Amino acid sequence: MELQRINEALDSYIRPQTFPVAVKMVGSANEIPEKARVPKRDLGVTMPVCQGIALARRYGWLMAMGEEDMLCPLGALTLGFVPAKAKFLDGSFNVPFWVKNQEVRAKINRNLPRLEQGKYSHLIAAHLHRADFEPQVIVVYGNPAQISRLIQSAVYGTGEPVASMSAGGFACGGEVTQTILTDQCQLIVAGGGDRALALTQDHEMSFAMPMSKAEALIEGLEGTHKAGLRYPTLSFLTYQAQFPQGFGELMDYLRQGD
């Protein structure tokens, strides 16, 4: 399915405030597009995955990120850039730092979705309209009403609810890894890193779809639109409003003959 058609449908029916992002995992540095910005090489910084995606969706930049660009160990782990070693899996390190104890931390870490270690060398992210590659995943950020329209469109042809693995963090794991592993659409409520470091706003959440589901989702957008679902959400306005008593008395007085 043409990326231009997907982008046009999202613009028409969802009207996202930031660019939809095309994401692809590649197996070698040779597959990095020539014009891609690589954080450490081109910007002199390392960064979390969510920040790289934010640069694609807010600036429209073509981004490429490998192990050497990773600031966040969880992002490096979920993309399979580094191995999940024993002291990560048993919660020995204070990451995430905000859970009750090591046992809970270990459970979260063991459940972090992970791509096969070493399978991919880089993540490529680009504004969907400008992507010159076939993405594995398309990520859309929006407010709850916009994301609801995407959920409705995914459900349109299947009757199956959209899954969410939100745990208050690790948005990249839901947007990229879980979507690739399951080949299913995902709903992600952004957490700490995405909001604090990638500047995802309080009103924003995200929706990720595998490329294999894009055609069905566009069909769902069109079908649900024809059925009457809209963004912005239509308000029900054909009702009899109630005014304070004085308004009715005044109207009665004005209607009376002299």
Image: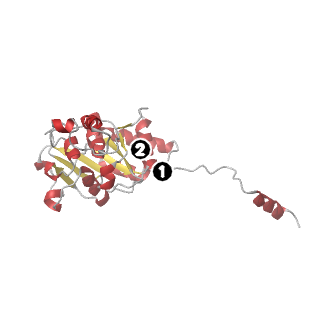
Indicate the position of residue 49 as horizontal and vertical percent values: 24, 50
Circles 2, 1 touching at the beta carbon (< 8 Å): no
Q: Residues within 10 Å of mark 1 (few under 14, many from 20)?
A: some
The image quarter containing residue 159 is top left
Q: Is residue 6 left or right of residue 257?
A: left
Q: CA distance from mark 2 to mark 1?
A: 10 Å
Q: Is residue 21 above or below residue 173?
A: below
User: Upstream in the sequence, badge 2 or badge 1?
Assistant: 2
Amino acid at the residue labelled 1: Tyr
What residue is drawn where x is 34% and y is 53%?
A: 195
**From this viewpoint, which residue is outermost toward the right?**
258
From the image, which quarter does the N terminus lie in? top left
Nearest to the observer: residue 46 or residue 37: 46
Say if residue 130 shows up in the picture.
no
Say if residue 153 shows up in the picture.
yes
From the image, which quarter does the C terminus lie in? bottom right
